[in-house]
Image: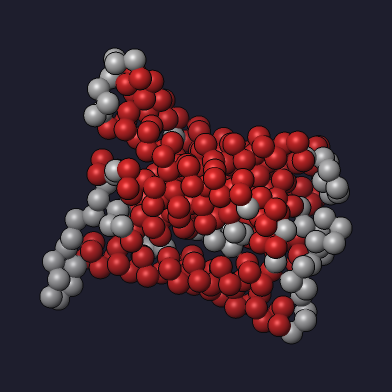
């Protein structure tokens, strides 16, 4: 991998990680369209450490408060009924599905799941799901001619059951094209949570999963055509760009709809289907040497 490739892939990772459009799919597609080798699951997981570091810094006050309350609840200094202490447990509970499924389907994640036909399908299907979830949220928020405005749930109403459902939604993002934020936010909206609450818990829930995945994949870094230098460089780029994107996104969702991302996902998926069907792009583009 050249330094130019690592710069562009790091930029793509930072731009797409927090948006509901799938960073893993865009890394895969960028390489395929540019005629580069597939950067691979290990490269993707490690560069995600960069964007997750942006989450740690952006939500540092929330994280510090949750950790303090959670540890305090273990020694009896903080009541276990405390909201922040409960959030600590809910993040742990919500991380279980992706941990179990990530280890179970590791070979598929690094192989068959990276097929461009599967990525195109997940882009379209999850785009439709996000669109439906967003419409339901908008209907509750605005009401209608014969419908009153319905108050949506915040994180203080999050329980173990919903936390596990969020976790299952996050685990779906093991398939490139699904999108971690897209799946968890869609799940949250369908369960009746506000856009901001769903997004905030989505980002907090991703922290242990992404960091654990990145550390686990460190042993595979430097293998094949991807060396340590470009991987670290891409991770730094992903961090810088990712921080700017998450700051923008958290402001965006307070007043805007997710529909632009829905249209983008569906259009990209259709274009990908057409290109593969016409033979203009191989469903395994870049894999042979990767």
- The quadrant in which the C terminus is found is bottom right
Q: Residue 117, relative to residue 47: is it above or below?
A: below
Q: To which quarter of the image does residue 284 belong?
A: bottom right
Judging depth in this view, the residue of 5 and 43 nearest the camera is: 43
**Residue for point 74% across, 84% down:** 278
Query: Looking at this rendering, what residue extends furthest in the front direction?
Result: 104
Q: How is the image coloured?
A: secondary structure
Tally of numbered tags: 0
- Residue 249: x, y in percent? 45, 51
- Residue 157: x, y in percent? 25, 44
In the drawing, does residue 159 fall left or right of residue 1? left
Q: Residue 65, relative to residue 129: is it above or below?
A: above
Q: Residue 147, relative to residue 169: is it above or below?
A: below
In the drawing, does residue 178 fall left or right of residue 136? right
Judging depth in this view, the residue of 219 and 57 nearest the camera is: 219
**Residue for point 70% across, 63% down:** 112
Let me know if residue 243 appears in the view: no
Let me know if residue 154 appears in the view: yes
- Residue 4: x, y in percent? 80, 50
């Amino acid at each position: 991998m050249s330094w130019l490739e690592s710069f562009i892939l790091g930029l793509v990772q930072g731009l797409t990680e927090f948006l509901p459009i799938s960073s893993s799919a865009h890394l895969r597609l960028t390489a395929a369209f540019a005629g580069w080798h597939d950067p691979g699951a290990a490269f993707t997981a490690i560069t995600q450490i960069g964007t997750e570091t942006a989450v740690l810094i952006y939500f540092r006050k929330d994280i510090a408060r949750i950790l303090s309350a959670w540890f305090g609840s273990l020694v009896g200094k903080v009541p276990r009924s405390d909201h922040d202490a409960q959030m600590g447990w809910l993040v742990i509970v919500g991380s279980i599905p992706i941990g179990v499924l990530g280890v179970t389907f590791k070979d598929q994640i690094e192989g068959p799941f990276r097929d461009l036909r599967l990525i195109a399908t997940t882009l379209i299907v999850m785009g439709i799901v996000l669109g439906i979830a967003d419409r339901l949220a908008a209907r509750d928020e605005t009401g209608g001619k014969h419908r009153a405005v319905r108050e949506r749930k915040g994180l203080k109403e999050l329980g173990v059951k919903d936390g596990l459902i969020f976790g299952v939604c996050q685990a779906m993002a093991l398939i490139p094209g699904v999108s971690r934020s897209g799946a968890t936010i869609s799940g949250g909206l369908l369960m009746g949570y506000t856009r901001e609450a769903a997004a905030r818990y989505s980002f907090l829930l991703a922290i242990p999963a992404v960091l654990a995945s990145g550390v686990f994949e460190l042993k595979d870094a430097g293998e094949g055509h991807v060396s340590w230098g470009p991987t670290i460089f891409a991770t730094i780029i992903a961090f810088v760009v990712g921080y700017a994107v998450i700051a923008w996104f958290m402001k965006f969702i307070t007043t805007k709809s997710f529909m632009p991302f829905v249209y983008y996902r569906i259009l990209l998926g259709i274009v990908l289907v057409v290109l593969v069907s016409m033979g203009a792009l191989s469903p395994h583009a870049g894999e042979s040497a990767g």
